[in-house]
């Protein structure tokens, strides 16, 4: 029996986190049963058969009480063609387990090519109100990554995010869009509608499908986005806010961090100087090609491909 909806129900119980879920999975896997089997038992039967503590027993009973609601949501998930990837799935990225440990998002909701999660990728991030120069840099950096077979990872906001997705898709590359809200809330912008290819695009959310956008969700999303990335390039960042916090997350997680070094910084790129000085970010400078000045991301590409 498919047990995914049972894991969704258990994950929704207040106080149940990734470490707790991993423990439950380890115990039931060791005796060859699924979570759906457990839900068929009474609390006393579970207590007698399994080495669960009282917190786990209480959590399972609470999950049983919301299972009907979860079943309705799960049917909608299936109807809309959304892929649900729990932490124990073979499709769940090993990199998230390695980098985040017990801080992983237990369940991923996605639409598109789930195999992209296994490919090496780099993040291209920037402020929503990125400068025209920064927009050009984001476009050309994503184009270079696509040419090198590196998946572009970004958020799904206007500005640098959407520019990076569009560039990679236009140039035949792969791209992963991390949503700061639930997967049911996604709307594909006109800017990339004409270049979307389901084989080369993945929209993914770590939140319950009906979750709305919030500042906290954006910050939490950025940490996961950085953890999946083999390098993070902050094109332009203000001195505070979500993009600056993403740089901080990359630094704290020991992900190679890059940012644009300008001779004169645009208004919404003043955080770049702090990223260079305080977080050990590597500067991305220009290189001349024909009559253009392009972002030199050779070192970033080496970090992704060879580390």
Image (tube, rainbow, N blue to C red):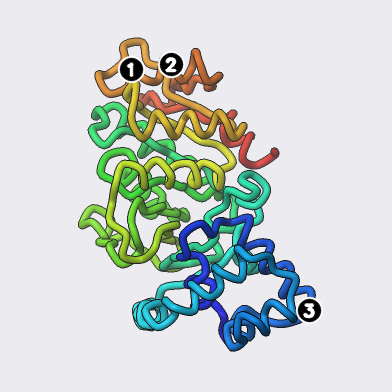
> How crowded is the residue under tag 1: few (<14 C-alpha within 10 Å), some, or many (20+)?
some
Q: In the figure, is residue 147 to the left or right of 29?
A: left
Label 2 belongs to which residue? 274
Q: Residue furthest top?
A: 263
User: In this orientation, which residue lies closer to the viewer: 71 or 40?
Assistant: 40
Going from N to C along the chain, the mark reached first, 3 or 2, is 3
> How crowded is the residue under tag 3: few (<14 C-alpha within 10 Å), some, or many (20+)?
few
Q: Residue furthest left?
A: 190
Q: Is residue 148 visible?
A: no
Image position of 190 with respect to 26: above or below: above
Distance between the alpha carbons at the discs numbered 3 and 2? 52 Å
At which x and y percent is residue 72? 36, 82
Residue name at image x 43 percent, y 16 percent? 274
User: In this orientation, which residue lies closer to the viewer: 162 or 40?
Assistant: 40
Distance between the alpha carbons at the discs numbered 1 and 2? 8 Å
Going from N to C along the chain, the mark reached first, 1 or 3, is 3
Label 1 belongs to which residue? 270
Image position of 82 with respect to 116: above or below: below
Q: Which of the 4 quarters of the picture holds residue 229?
A: top right
Residue name at image x 63 percent, y 86 percent? 37
Label 3 belongs to which residue? 31
At which x and y percent is residue 204? 43, 59
Distance between the alpha carbons at the discs numbered 1 and 3? 56 Å
Image quadrant occupied by the N terminus = bottom right
Which mark is on residue 126?
A: none
- The mark closer to the camera, 3 or 2, is 3
Q: Are marks 1 and 3 in contact (CB under 8 Å)?
A: no
Q: In the figure, is residue 223 to the left or right of 196?
A: right
């Amino acid at each position: 029996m498919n047990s995914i909806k049972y894991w969704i129900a258990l994950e929704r119980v207040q106080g149940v986190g990734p470490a707790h879920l991993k423990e439950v999975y380890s115990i039931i896997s060791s005796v060859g049963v699924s979570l759906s089997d457990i839900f068929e038992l009474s609390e006393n039967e579970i207590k007698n058969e399994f080495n669960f503590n009282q917190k786990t027993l209480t959590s399972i009973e609470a999950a049983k009480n919301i299972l009907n609601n979860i079943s309705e949501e799960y049917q909608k998930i299936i109807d809309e063609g959304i892929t649900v990837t729990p932490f124990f799935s073979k499709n769940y990225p090993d990199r998230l387990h390695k980098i985040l440990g017990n801080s992983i998002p237990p369940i991923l909701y996605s639409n598109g090519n789930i195999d992209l999660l296994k490919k090496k990728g780099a993040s291209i991030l920037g402020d929503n109100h990125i400068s025209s120069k920064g927009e050009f840099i984001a476009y050309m950096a994503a184009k270079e990554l696509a040419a090198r077979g590196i998946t572009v990872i970004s958020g799904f906001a206007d500005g640098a995010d959407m520019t990076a997705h569009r560039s990679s898709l236009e140039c035949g590359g792969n791209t992963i869009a991390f949503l700061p809200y639930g997967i049911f809330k996604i709307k594909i912008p006109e800017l990339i509608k004409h270049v979307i290819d389901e084989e080369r695009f993945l929209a993914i959310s770590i939140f319950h499908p009906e979750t709305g956008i919030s500042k906290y969700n954006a910050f939490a999303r950025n940490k996961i986005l950085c953890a999946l990335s083999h390098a993070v390039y902050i094109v332009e960042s203000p001195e505070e806010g979500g993009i600056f916090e993403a740089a901080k997350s990359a630094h704290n997680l020991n992900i190679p961090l890059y940012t644009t070094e300008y001779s004169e910084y645009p208004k919404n790129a003043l955080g770049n100087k702090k990223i260079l000085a305080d977080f050990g970010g590597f500067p991305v400078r220009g290189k001349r090609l024909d009559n253009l000045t392009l972002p030199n991301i050779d070192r970033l590409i080496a970090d992704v491909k060879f580390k």
